[in-house]
Amino acid sequence: MAARERAYFRAFRRVTTVVNSDAALKEVLDAIVRGTSRAMQAGVSLVLLDASREKLVHCCSWGLPRAYLQKGVLDARRSLAEVVTGQPVAISDVARDGRIQYSELAAKAGIVSMLGVPLVMKGMAVGSLRVYSRQRTEFSKQETNFVTAMANLAAVAIERDVQRQPGPPAGAQAGGALLRQARTAAFAHPSEEEFARILDFYNVEWIYEPRSFPLRWQGDVVTEMFTPDFYLPGFDLYVELTALKQSLVTEKNRKLRRLRELYPDVRITLLYKKDIHRLLAKYGFGPLAQARGRGVGRVLYSSVEIEQQVRKLAEQLSHDYADRHPVMVGVLRGVFCFMADLVRHMTIPVDVEFMAISYYGGATTASVKITKDMDLNAAGRHVIMVEDIVDTGLTLSYLLSHLMAKGPASVAVCALLDKRVRRIVNVPLDYIGFEVPDEFVVGYGLDYDEEYRNLPFIAILGSL
Ligand code: 5GP
């Protein structure tokens, strides 16, 4: 047997042993990538499609420099075509081939030739296994067949893992759900892991440290880089967390400013430790979740100011929806005061509906769930979502995607309070009562640990 064939055989023996064990999916995919890399004597990476099937996200790799891996999310249409066509694609000269999205970075990493084979599950391409060679290689039929067999093993492992999870994903969502399960993040800091749990909780897709942005150069050499902690492909947004001392936060802010100057199209937001604690507190974790009896601090809006503003919103809605008989949908429970006052000031016929959501906590299964859906059929109707407060926007974005699936004629959002400074995801608000500062507010329906809902005014919660 030739040396090459022996290497393939050894790789199969090692990889199938791991596939056939009860190892976690991460370990199985790592073994496949490593085995392929050793047998091919080249760098190998496994990329998966996100839920939109437009972006390719790095899952695991072997034998490739970090700078190349953190080149960013790949556009599935501009990247190698194997995921779109379902056929292997080989490129013998990366430097001279227009099909490579990051040819300059590839050249810097010493990559000369590439082979990509699709990862196919139930006839649908969900990702790709890619080989990056440092020598010019015309990939033979035998090599392509070997990599295809490894990709098939990866697809089998992923599919088996999907079946183990409750509520297997279907159709277009498959890619995104796979990504979540197959993702192999090693978090540098516990707050990053907590934030990832929050995103999972809201069903928001995330990728950990997908891209490094060069910030400074000396000649050709990059002297300063910045790697944001997370990328949320669904919102095209990078998120940097900071749980650090003020002096280090200042440094981070400087880097962020530079990044925004150099890459004006890149959207990035900075989240502070207290933001993460507040998010965690929503589902009972973290230091804020245990805090009690804080008392009410400064009043932000008196009951008179609230009434005037709610009246204005009602007039505007009555005018805009004069002939459309809208369905007003409130999200319980914080909205109950606002909804009751708003509809009473409206001068057109409206239907009133409520939805209820719950935040379920849990180490792996945490999620936001709709515990009471609309009773009315929303298809073809003009829907107005009524919210007490929009903070990060995560709840609203989840609810809007749920609502859009019902086929309404139109959807608008009316929020009493807009805490814009803390927005993570960009949700369109059509009608806004007040823009509130970055403070935790209570009263007029809004609670802190079920207290203060019945206050007639809106106040900032007192400090501990
Ligand atoms: P988002 O998903 O936009 O971060 O959060 C929206 C939900 O968080 C609101 O419906 C509300 O339940 C809660 N929330 C956000 N900020 C505040 C606040 O300042 N006070 C109170 N009581 N709840 C808030």
Image (spheres, rainbow, N blue to C red):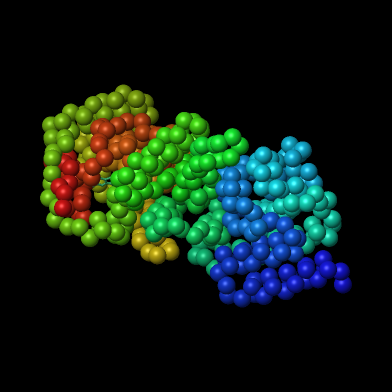
Query: In this image, 176 relative to 375: left or right?
Result: right
Left or right: 306 as drawn, with respect to 65: left
Q: Residue, x 38% and y 39% (percent of image)?
A: 253
Q: Which of 234 and 69 is in front in this view?
A: 69
Residue 398 appears in the rendering: yes
Q: Whole-percent x and y of residue 160?
A: 60, 67
Q: Position of residue 122 (x, y in %)?
A: 68, 58
Q: Nearer the viewer, residue 438 or 401?
A: 438
Relative height, residue 425 to residue 319 (above, below): below
Q: Along the line of sight, which residue is nearer the eye, 257 or 331?
A: 257
Residue 367 in view of the camera: no
Residue at the limit of the structure toward the right, as seen here: 1
Above or below — where is 182 with respect to 398? below
Give above or below for 430 relative to 182. Answer: above
Instruction: Report the side of 178 relative to 35 (left or right).
Output: left
Q: Which of 189 and 391 lies nearest the eye of the viewer?
A: 189
Q: In which quarter of the image is the N terminus?
A: bottom right
